[in-house]
Image (cartoon, rainbow, N blue to C red):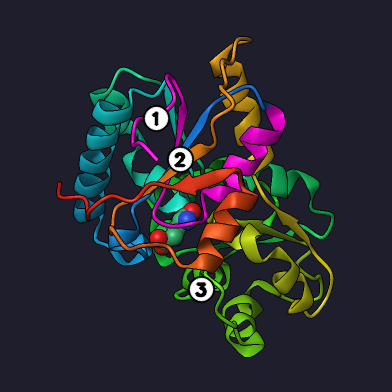
Amino acid sequence: MSSAAPISSVLVFDSGLGGLTVLREIEKARPDLPLTYVADDAVFPIGRLADDVLTARVVSVMEHYIAKLAPRMAVIACNTASTLVLPVLRAKFTIPFVGTVPAIKPACAQSKTKRISVLATPGTVARDYTKALIKEFAGDCKVTLVGAENLASLAEASMRGAAVDEMAIVRELSRCFVDDGARTDTVVLACTHYPLILDRLKACSPWPVTFIDPAPAIARRVSELAGPDGDKSTETGRAYFTSGHTPGPELVAALAAFGLAPVHEPPLKV
Ligand code: DGL
C-alpha cells in the first residue's frame, strides 16, 4: 500500500489504540469523511510523561503528520494530551483541532445520587484543566478522581490479543465505587482506551453504574466543523504507528474492524 493519505482526511491522534473509540463514532456519524489514524505508540503510555516532555512530543508528532498528510482537521483523541496541549496546537497550526476532555458536566447533570467518579490516567487526574472542570460543572456532586496506572495498557494488550486478568481490571476500577450513604451511579471514562474494554469494566463493577463515553459528542463536533461535504473515496483508512513495529495478526484484524489498514513505515524520528 502506498503511504499517501486520502486528500483532506480527518486525522485522529492518540498515544495508542484508544483513539479508535473516537474514530468509530466519527465514522458512524459521518461515513462520508475520510479518516486517518495516528498512534504515537513509540511513547505509549503517555500518562506517565512529564508535562513539558508530553507537550513537545505531541507538537513534533503533529507537525510531522500535518506536513505529510495535509488533513482538514485533527482530533486529539486522548484526554491526557488534550487537557494539556490543545492551546499550544491551536496557536501553532492553522487547521482546526477537536479535543477530548473529561465529560464531567454531563455526568454531574445526569447523576441521581450526586456521586460521580472520573476514571483517567494519572496525568489527566492531576491536570489543572480537570480541576477547573470540576469547579465549574460539578455543583452539588461529589467527584472522586481515580488515576489508573495500568488500565490503558490493559486495554491496549487486550486489543493486541493478550489475555487480561479480571483481578488486574478490578484493582484499577474499584476506587471508582464509593458508598458513603449514597452510592456512585456514574463513572466518566476519561481515557479513550477504556471504552475498548467496556464489557469487562461492566462485568467487574460491584454495582451497576452509567459509564460515560464522550466519543459521540466529539463526533458531533467533528461533523459540525467538517461542514456538509465529505469526499470519501472507496479507499480503506490508513493507520500510522510511530514505533515502526509491524502489527501482529490480531491487531491487523482489530484495525480492519475499525475500517483501517496499517501503513508500514520505519520508526518516526522527530
Ligand atoms: N488514550 C489516552 C487518554 O485518553 C491515554 C493513554 C496513555 O496513557 O497513553 O488519555
In the figure, residue 117 lies in which quadrant?
bottom right
Pointer 2 or 1: first along the chain: 1
Q: In this picture, which residue range is highlighted in magenta?
A: 1-29
> In the image, residue 3 lies at what x, y percent?
33, 37
The quadrant of the picture showing ligand 1 is bottom left
Image depth: mark 3 or mark 2 in front:
2
For label 1, the SS is loop
- Looking at the picture, which amino acid does disc 3 mark? Ala
Residue 190 in view, yes or no: no
In the figure, residue 53 lies in which quadrant?
bottom left
Residue drawn at 54 percent across, 44 percent down? 260
- Looking at the picture, which amino acid does disc 2 mark? Arg
Residue drawn at 44 percent across, 75 percent down? 149
Pointer 3 or 2: first along the chain: 3
For label 3, the SS is helix
Residue drawn at 39 percent across, 24 percent down? 71
Q: Is residue 261 above or below residue 117?
A: above
Residue 79 in view, yes or no: yes
> In the image, residue 138 lies at what x, y percent?
63, 48
Marking on residue 5: 1
**Ligand 1 within 8 Å, label 2 CB:** no
Marking on residue 49: none
